[in-house]
Amino acid sequence: MLSLLYVIISGIALPIGGVQMQYLWRNQLGDVYSLGLGSAACLGAAAATMSGWCSLTVGSFICTLICTVICFFVTLRVSTQNLITFGILFGTFIGSLGTIVVTNAPNGDLLKQYYLWGAANFNLEGVTTSDIIFSLVLFAIGLTAAIWTAKALTRHMKEEIELSNMYKALLLLAIMFLVTSAVSICGPIGFISLGVPNLSRILCKSTDIRKHYMISSAMGVGLLLITYVVANHVNFFGIYLPISATMAIIALPLMAILFVKKS
């Protein structure tokens, strides 16, 4: 049941976070992972797994929240365009640290444990009740903020208003809370936070972000459920398929068809 719960949470949190980023940046390439969130989650999980100083999910939470705070203060000082550049460089730096930590794993069992988390197969190994409660609180805060700020983000996207740096920073914090609620428990899941929002914008021409919340969430949950079933079914035959890789294989042809149709 917990696995299915986090399939649903991830299917909602990641696409909504991606839509918010695209509206905040006024750019269809907006993605929650562009600011180093995925790399921070991996670094925290790797450090916790290899050192044993805390649970894998707690380590991931701590690192992603540190990343959130850093990006929060950077947002107050730089333009949106420069924030994207900073995010890419920051994510690369954090990813490099994560690579060093993983490369120096004390033994193969710890490396396997970390990899299984990073493969995002919703096994929830090592997840505690405290992790779940913390995750659900973050999800609730992020989703409430997404709904609360929907009107302002829509007007910002249409260039009717310009959000203040403080408002952008607070919004970024809420977005990362939403996304961290899924990533820290299940591991980074590619495509869904970038591809699904773009699919939504192809299918629905409305600029009302609330419509894209609903469409993206429905598609995100549907894709993850299909991917989850396929990955677990294939596992019966002794083949291990990570969720992120399986989703890309399933979803990319669909996205290609829609882009060709749009063209």
Image: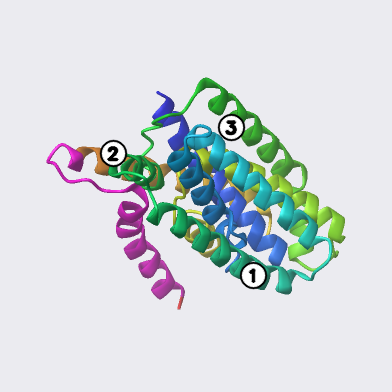
Residue to which mark 3 is pinned:
135
- Residue 255 lies in the magenta-colored region: yes
Instruction: Provide the secondary structure element on which disc 2 rests.
Output: helix
Q: Nearer the viewer, residue 154 or 131?
A: 131
* Disc 3 to disc 2: CB gap under 8 Å: no
Instruction: Provide the secondary structure element on which disc 3 rests.
Output: helix
Q: Residue at x 73, y 41 (%)?
A: 145
- Residue 164 lies in the magenta-colored region: no
Tell me if mark 2 has few (under 14), some (14-19) or many (20+) residues whose alpha carbon lies within 10 angstroms of its own. Answer: few
Q: Is residue 119 left or right of residue 47?
A: left
The residues bearing labels 1 and 2 have C-alpha atoms spaced at a distance of: 33 Å
Q: Nearer the viewer, residue 263 or 28?
A: 28
Which of labels 3 and 1 is toward the front?
3
Which of labels 3 and 2 is toward the front?
3
The residues bearing labels 3 and 2 have C-alpha atoms spaced at a distance of: 24 Å
Disc number for residue 27: 1
Disc number for residue 229: 2
* Number of numbered markers: 3
| Identity, as a three-letter code, of the amino acid under mark 3 | Ser
**Comes first in the chain, label 3 or label 2:** 3
Instruction: Provide the secondary structure element on which disc 1 rests.
Output: loop
Q: Find residue 49 and report its image quarter.
A: top left
Disc number for residue 181: none
Query: What segment is highlighted magenta in the picture?
Result: 234-262
